[in-house]
Image: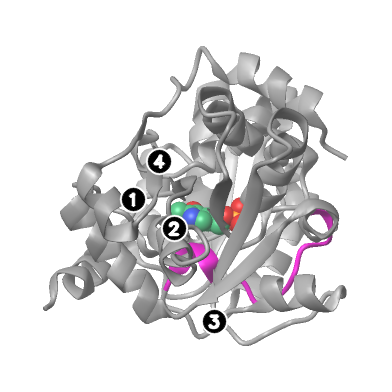
Amino acid sequence: MTDIRDVLEARALLAPHLPETPMWSYPVLDAAVGARVHVKHENVQPTGAFKVRGGITLLARMPDARRGVVAYSTGNHAQSVAYAARLHGVPCSVVMPENPNPAKVAAVEALGAHVHVAGATMVEAARHAGDLADREGMRLVSPADEPDIIAGVGTLYAEILTARPRLDAVFVPVGSGTGAAAACIVAEALAPACRVIAVQSAQAPAAHDSWRLGEAVTRPVKTVVDGLATGSAFAMTQAVMRARLDDFVLVDDEDILRAQRMLLTEAHTLAEGAGAAALAALLARREEFAGAEVAVVCTGGNAGPAELARLLAA
Ligand SMILES: *Cc1c(COP(=O)(O)O)cnc(C)c1O
């Protein structure tokens, strides 16, 4: 399993490729929340989301990277793997389920990856990706059960907790759980007193319910929040969360939309829904954290046209 040494190695490895992202606090946001809030800005990554840290780390450590990689994803994981493959000069294919969002196809193709549209659902797309990897001799990249991805994502939490070792808590949105697992590993080593608090949409609670129940369960996905839309739990990230995670909050999609608007107006930051979920969780727990010093990770800013319209509608 990934440990803090892997994260610190990944930090050195990523340094020439990705500068440290900014972390700012905003007095009007602090006043609105009633706490000292540090916003970690992963929305400014070159792919618009934190996942690129994991993709670059995975490919840099892959011994036989030249054979290429296959991912299945419609969103930020696809862009992460495609970006990393281009950086390392490695062939990359991405399988997306039928009727993909054209903007997301274009983003992945612009990075030089080959997009295959196959399967009615993500589960079927994953099977097609596995077949393609077998056929072409390429490596299938899981969105979460990959120690090197968790190590790379951990660099985000190493940046936060090196800059602010006395934080009371860090709030982390969860889809597959790489971010929350990485936060647990890093907090344990660098800031044991810092609480790690995960958040998911109540409209897609598989990771939350699996953590609470102590066993992997599947749940329907009804959330409109892309990065959080996972219907089952990932073994590796759940195991880490079980050992160290302090709390797991559920918020409604409506709460996430409100937090997205708050980031826009109080922190001049365009977050996609998943990127505002950490703030939504803090707002849901504002009494508990009144006067505390906390970090919320704005994990990404890839809001598509429909999401932008929803965000700006009164
Ligand atoms: C993937 C993603 C998440 C969820 O991260 P996991 O590591 O899958 O739990 C949150 N926010 C954004 C913007 C994402 O792309």
Give how far apart the Cα atoms at labels 4 and 1 are: 17 Å
Q: Quadrant of the C terminus?
A: bottom left
In percent of width and height, residue 149 lies at 69, 39
Which numbered tag is attached to residue 290? Answer: 2
Q: Nearer the viewer, mark 3 or mark 4?
A: 4
| Residue located at (38% from left, 59% from top) | 276
Q: In the image shown, does 259 or 120 lie closer to the viewer?
A: 259
Q: What residue is pinned by disc 4?
A: 38
Circle 3 residue: 202
Instruction: For the residues labelled 3 and 1, say whether their Cβ atoms are less than 8 Å apart.
Output: no
Q: Residue at x 70, y 28 (%)?
A: 190
Type of the residue with mark 1: Gly
Disc 3/disc 2 C-alpha distance (Å): 24 Å
Instruction: Give x and y (percent) for residue 46.
Output: 37, 33
Specify whether residue 71 is in view: no
In contact (CB < 8 Å): disc 4 and disc 1: no
Q: Is residue 279 left or right of residue 59?
A: left
